[in-house]
Amino acid sequence: MQDDDQYDLEFEVFKKDVKNIIGVDLNQYKPSQMKRRIKSFISKYNFKNLKEFVNVLRQDESVLFTFKDYITINVTEFFRNAEKFEELRLKIIPGLISNAKGKGKSDLKIWSAGCSTGAEAYSTAIIMDAYFPGQNYSILATDIDVNIVKNAKIGEYKDIEVKNVNTKIMEKYFEVQGSKYKIKEFVKKNVKFTLNNLLEDQFSSGFDLIMCRNVVIYFTEEAKELLYKKFYNALTEKGVLFIGGTESILNAKQIGFSMNNNLFYYK
């Protein structure tokens, strides 16, 4: 096994190679946690060192996809932190609808950023259909991983991913196919999935609601601040950023946010 100093030197070269191969800048992730995750991955697949691993990434597409999925942490479930989705339904969305009407807007523009396999975006679409019938809305759902986005468009899930879905919602919005639960096609009509690198790409603007939940936990503080500023600029006036249950925006006031509800930040 390499000593730490040698590994650190190789890791600097490795980060540049990864940026060139898959477009992910590992400098924007917390170094100690990312090193630990990569060491674990290399050990699991029996690579001798980072140089050998990079060579395999360049040649073996299946390893490349597995690694990209591993470092971008695609964990998802419907109505994650169910009490917060209740708050979204009972307080946040009604307020956003009222705010939009006050501006003469007839629709809500929603973004699920770092959407993984789409459970968050579809959860929101279900809320809109079930509790706000007749309200026009669109949901943009983005992720950095091309295969994850393909799977999100299909909308097929395991039982653990739908554990928070009650029977009534299950019957109306899902097709049960053996051990799989598939989103019905009519739920997809207002949801558009596409690729996006949150730390590198430009954002659209005018969003009433941006959801970025459990995505930034491995980012450096500098990368988080950059991202939250970009989200702030992408929101409409009095728009809301909805973050994950273990997250907080330390410099929210300096960016321009106010926090009227836990996990919900207002522009």
Image: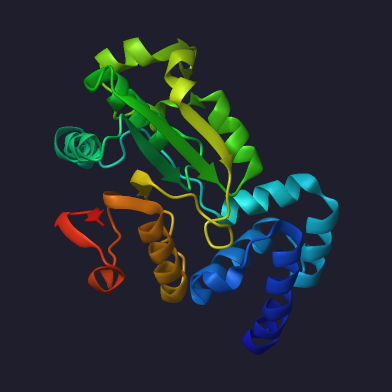
Residue 20, horizontal then vertical, whole percent = 75, 65
Task: Give the camera-side residue of 103 and 177.
Answer: 103
Position of 161 with respect to 257 (left or right) is right
Task: Give the camera-side residue of 260 and 42.
Answer: 260
Is residue 244 visible in this depiction of the protein?
no
User: Residue at image x 42%, y 42%?
Assistant: 112
User: Residue at image x 57%, y 49%?
Assistant: 196
* Quadrant placement of the C terminus: bottom left
Q: How is the image coloured?
A: rainbow
Circle count: 0
Vertical relation: 50 (above or below) 190: below
Vertical relation: 41 (above or below) 253: above
Residue 161, horizontal then vertical, whole percent = 40, 32
Q: Quadrant of residue 138?
A: top left
Is residue 90 visible in this depiction of the protein?
yes
Residue 114, horizontal then vertical, whole percent = 48, 48
Residue extending farthest bottom: 5
Position of 107 with respect to 13 (left or right) is left
Residue 225, horizontal then vertical, whole percent = 40, 70
Task: Give the camera-side residue of 99 and 168.
Answer: 99
Q: Quadrant of residue 255?
A: bottom left
Vertical relation: 31 (above or below) 65: below
* Quadrant placement of the N terminus: bottom right
User: Residue at image x 30%, y 29%?
Assistant: 106
Q: Quadrant of residue 119?
A: top left
Vertical relation: 63 (above or below) 14: above
Position of 18 with respect to 169 (left or right) is right
User: Residue at image x 60%, y 69%?
Assistant: 26
